[in-house]
Amino acid sequence: MTEQTTTSTYIDRDTAIKAIRAALRRRSGKAWSVRGGRGTAWGWITISSPPARSADRWGTMTDAEAAELGELLGLGHPVHPQGQGIPAGSRDYRNFIDRAEGRTPASREVW
């Protein structure tokens, strides 16, 4: 997805995960963990540092990684140490694909 996504385009969870993961790798030069939820949280996506770069055995991100991810996503602040959650929904997926690709999203809402 090289141009800003339109608000009428449906994006499924797996497509969003692939697009966000690829955009963050392209822009930062390193891998990020972009995972879909399970069970009742199936549609949610979480972005964080991969387990190999975690600050502790619980998967908490370092302050530097949280700040870098917040910057990559254009949030203006570090993400939570457990990562950035994305609600289940095509509009939210589009928002974070735009952010991961370095664009201003059509919807500025962030959870």
Image: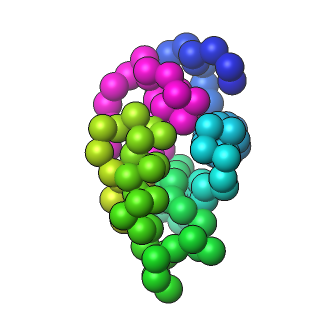
Q: Is residue 110 magenta?
A: yes
Q: Name the quadrant of the N terminus.
A: top right
Q: As displayed, is residue 64 above or below residue 108?
A: below
Q: Quadrant of residue 109?
A: top left
Camera-side residue: 109 or 49? 49
Q: Is residue 107 magenta?
A: yes
Q: Position of residue 17 (x, y in %)?
A: 64, 45
**Residue 39 in view of the camera:** yes
Q: Position of residue 20 (x, y in %)?
A: 61, 40
Camera-side residue: 7 or 47? 47
Q: Position of residue 62 (x, y in %)?
A: 42, 68
Magenta stretch: give its range. Answer: 85-111
- The residue that appears at 48% across and 31% down in the rendered structure is 99
- The residue that appears at 58% across and 30% down in the rendered structure is 101
**Residue 94 in view of the camera:** no
Q: How many marks overall?
A: 0
Q: As displayed, is residue 15 above or below residue 45?
A: above
With 25 as the anchor, is 85 left or right in this view?
Answer: left
Q: Position of residue 84 (x, y in %)?
A: 42, 52
- The residue that appears at 68% across and 20% down in the rendered structure is 2
